[in-house]
Image (cartoon, helix red, strand yellow):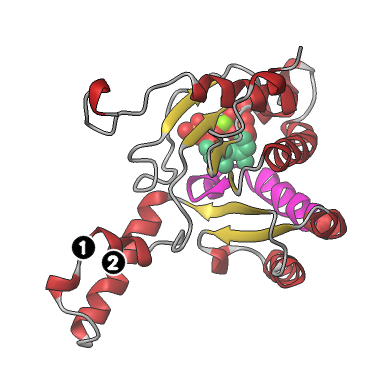
């Protein structure tokens, strides 16, 4: 029996975020170059996206490249950027067939022109799709996002567009890259690492965290469904006591 059959379809997270980790170690175990791990991870992205779509998850956010990842060897950074351009160009048709809308969060201006162009085209081509929104976190870090938000809020205060007393949680949310997107109920991280690595620090405030030892290139639909099942067995109390729920 598949984990999918046990999933309670009336309690599906609306938004799932994934830290896709372990490509390098997966490749190393096979005696291959790290880059082979990254290209093999593309199939896992398809699997996660299909699984999300099958059970009605509305938003899937994938951590694809962090601000810190810019400091990796240049060869690896270049290969990741090339892979991104190629994958996006190859997948547009399938995204449209599956009614997937593409979005991005991150400091896109840092990406090579070719990537920005491919992303812009894919976002434009998929903007009317309404089944799932796939959000790629690219050149993203939560501290970048929060610093940026503070900067923009201060500018708007200085320009008298808002006053300091207007600043509340809702306003802060509207200055984040995820404006309009609900917080993830569930965060999945693969590869056995148990940390956040500068991902969605504000938005994960009350998310359930799920860690699996599976390396990202081995991640399949079944692994995704197992994470959902695990999530469904948790009690989300939000500071209350059980009896109040
Ligand atoms: C995740 O896999 C992909 C990116 C960070 C781009 P890694 O490349 O971090 O793989 P490991 O963690 O070194 O195995
Ligand atoms: C986090 O993975 C970033 C992405 C998955 C894109 P890393 O492999 O870069 O994180 P650390 O270095 O283990 O914290
Ligand atoms: Mg890693």
**Vertical position of residue 86 compared to residue 209: above or below:** below
Give whichever of 70, 137 is nearer the camera. Answer: 137
Q: Quadrant of ligand 1?
A: top right
Quarter occupied by the N terminus: top right
**Vertical position of residue 161 compared to residue 234: above or below:** below
Is any atom of residue 208 visible in this view? yes
Q: Which residues are magenta?
A: 64-87
Is any atom of residue 220 visible in this view? no
**Which mark is drawn over residue 22?**
none
**Residue at the location (55% across, 50% down)?**
70
Question: What residue is shown with label 1?
Answer: 168
Question: What residue is shown with label 2?
Answer: 171
Q: Residues within 10 Å of mark 2 (few under 14, many from 20)?
A: some
Residue 166, position as x, y percentages in the image: 18, 72
**Residue at the location (55% across, 40% down)?**
16
Q: Is residue 54 magenta?
A: no
Q: Residue furthest top?
A: 1
Q: Residues within 10 Å of mark 1 (few under 14, many from 20)?
A: few
Give whichever of 84, 92 is nearer the camera. Answer: 92
Q: CA distance from mark 2 to mark 1?
A: 5 Å
Residue 38, position as x, y percentages in the image: 73, 37
Residue 78, position as x, y percentages in the image: 70, 52
Secondary structure mostly seen in the magenta stretch: helix
**Residue at the location (48% across, 46% down)?**
68
Quarter occupied by the C terminus: top left
**Residue at the location (53% across, 59% down)?**
105
**Vertical position of residue 69 compared to residue 4: above or below:** below
Determine whether the residue tagged by mark 2 lies in a helix, strand or loop: helix
Tell me, yes or no, whether the two marked residues, 2 and 1, touch with CB atoms within 8 Å: yes
Residue 182, position as x, y percentages in the image: 45, 52
Image side of residue 176 versus residue 121, left or right: left
């Amino acid at each position: 029996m598949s984990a999918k059959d046990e999933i309670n379809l009336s309690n599906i997270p609306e938004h799932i975020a994934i830290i896709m980790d372990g490509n390098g170690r997966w490749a190393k175990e096979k005696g291959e170059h790290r880059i082979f791990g990254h290209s093999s991870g593309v199939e896992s992205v398809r699997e996660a996206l299909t699984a999300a779509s099958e059970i009605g998850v509305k938003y899937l956010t994938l951590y694809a490249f962090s601000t810190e990842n810019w400091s990796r060897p240049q060869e690896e950074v270049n290969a990741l950027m090339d892979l991104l351009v190629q994958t996006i160009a190859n997948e547009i048709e399938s995204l449209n067939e599956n009614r997937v809308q593409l979005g991005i969060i991150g400091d896109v201006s840092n990406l090579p022109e070719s990537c920005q162009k491919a992303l812009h085209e894919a976002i434009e081509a998929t903007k009317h799709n309404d089944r799932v929104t796939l959000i790629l976190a690219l050149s993203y870090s939560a501290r970048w996002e929060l610093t940026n938000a503070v900067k923009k809020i201060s500018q708007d205060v200085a320009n008298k567009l808002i006053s300091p007393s207007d600043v509340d949680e809702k306003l802060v949310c509207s200055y984040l890259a995820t404006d309009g997107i609900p917080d993830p109920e569930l965060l999945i991280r693969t590869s056995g690492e148990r940390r956040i690595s500068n991902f969605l620090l504000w938005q994960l405030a009350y998310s359930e965290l799920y860690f699996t030892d599976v390396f990202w290139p081995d991640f399949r639909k079944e692994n995704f469904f197992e994470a959902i099942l695990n999530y469904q067995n948790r009690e989300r109390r939000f500071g209350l006591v059980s009896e109040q729920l």
